[in-house]
Amino acid sequence: MEYSGIIKKLLDNRGITEEKDIEEFFSPLPQKTYDPFLLSGMEEGVELILKNVYAGKRICIYGDYDADGMTSISILYTVISELTDNLFYYIPSRFDEGYGLNKKAIDVIREKDTDMIITVDCGTVSYDEVEYAKRSGMDIVVTDHHHIDDRKADCILINPKQEECGYPFKDLAGCGVAYKLAQAIQQKAGLPRSLIIDILDIVAIGTVGDIVPLVDENRTLVKYGIEILNRRERPGVSLLSEKISLDRHIGSDQIAYGIVPHLNAAGRMSRADAGVQLLMAKTGEEAAPVADKLIEYNNERKSVQNRIYEECMAIWERENKEDLFPIIKSEKAHEGIVGIVAGKIKEQIGRPVSIVTPAAEGYLKGTGRSIRSVDIYEVMKTQSGLFEKFGGHKGACGYMMKRENLEDLRRGVNREMEKLLDEDPDIFTDETSAEMYIEPGEADLELALDIEKMEPFGNGNPRPVFGLKDVFIGNVQFMGKDGNHVRFMAGKDGSSMDCILFQRAKEFSDELETRGSVEMLGEFSVNRWKGNENIQFIVDDIKA
């Protein structure tokens, strides 16, 4: 199929230039997926799991308390439960145990006469904990996707980021690795292939939720997963979607801003088990109270989040305003919410931000979020000698340290930021920018429909932002109860298009009333109404 020059330029920006890659990118049935046995440790891992299954041994699936961990557990549990019912899962408490394997949890698991632990979305660098589990007499297989920055666990380890692993795609989410293990088990055990197709909706939720790049095999998994998700055949997800008004087509945005926050709210406000219960519910009747509980958790999360945001912003104003990398100490912040609050503050002030809260006596626990131009993991890693625990990636990190190390950490990260600022004086300039400028006359319904085909959007495949220069605004119509939405026309050289601006009409009142030309940034979409389709421009910014 032939695509316009605009679409080809967008693909070029994403490194998609070969005809076969373009065809794959737009295919409703993408084929980029790889043999699970290309993952190091997969053959041995499946063999050990099936050995325990066939011997009637008791198996525990141990996962993280976020959406990636919940979906990983659900994927593996669904497949292994076809072979044995001597199976359970364990999710540590964010508040009492923290992320990853811990010895207290291993003791609890062992007391249940468990013979084997399979980790999902954690465990790669849990060397001591794995040794402890082995000494307790249990077999262990670790599946994970996190960076390896410490001593690796000495056991069967399935993680595409291992140096010796020749798997063609390194950026699977934790649930993606769990899915490849599920695939391998299905193949070796001769289970129906439909089993692993039916769980792709869970894979899509976890992959989008973990903000991994939506390219290559991730794109394939999410694209198929979204198709299955929209069949509304999973009772829990279908019911939650209905209750939170996701009543139209569910895409990556609806997953990221609707489904995932409700799953994550369980682990933030209480225990994450409710998320797994929702994903694995067999009937709507079984799912209903769990969906209601998740909605309640999410509403509580939003309320607490707003309060903590105000408190932390006040601390920043008072104590950290001059820092290039503020580390905000809050004695009262809710541990399950500080990551979101750090993200909101970094958006507000345009700098990487970390919030620390009290942990065990004499210790602080911290979480950080970063702007696009700063790799927070690399900055914090320079201070690794101050941490008891540390992990993360370019955009986020978590750590634990002694209270007395806080000031040293502040000085250290600010020194690193000064170096980065010397190298790049524009490092804090993080404004939304247009991927491409076009003329109104170049935009038509076919362009908007082709952009739709570029979904799912997310990390690695951002929704295209377009710029329109020197356009004139007319036919302005304010909408909504408070008049804070506005629909208008933007024209130039005899061509015009429908535009809509949500939530911020008052913010741009001067620009909307100007008689001069303006520049606009935004996204093209298809407006569907009563069987008709039209292109519209969803405005992000207007500059006089």
Image (tube, rainbow, N blue to C red):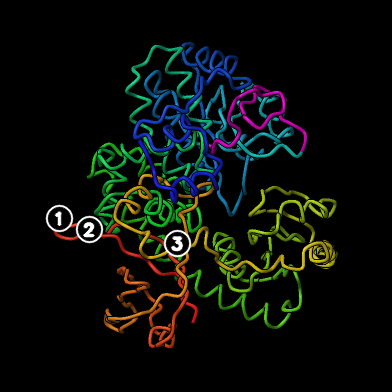
Asked whether the residues under the numbered discs 3 and 2 touch, taking CB atoms below 8 Å apart as contact, a structural biologist would say: no
Which tag, 1 or 3, sits closer to the chain's start? Answer: 3
Question: Label 3, on which residue?
Answer: 438
Which tag, 3 or 2, sits closer to the chain's start? Answer: 3
Judge whether residue 158 is colored magenta. yes
Residue 81 figure quarter = top left
Asked whether the residues under the numbered discs 1 and 2 touch, taking CB atoms below 8 Å apart as contact, a structural biologist would say: yes
Could you say where residue 187 lies in the image, as x and y percent from the top left?
Answer: 43, 14
Q: Secondary structure at mark 1?
A: loop
Q: Cα distance, mark 1 to mark 3? A: 28 Å
- Foreground mark, 3 or 2, reads 3
Q: Cα distance, mark 3 to mark 2? A: 23 Å
Amino acid type, residue under disc 1 in the picture: Gly
Judge whether residue 80 is colored magenta. no
Q: Nearer the viewer, residue 283 or 410?
A: 410
Q: Which span is picked out in magenta?
A: 150-174
Numbered mark located on residue 531 in the image:
1
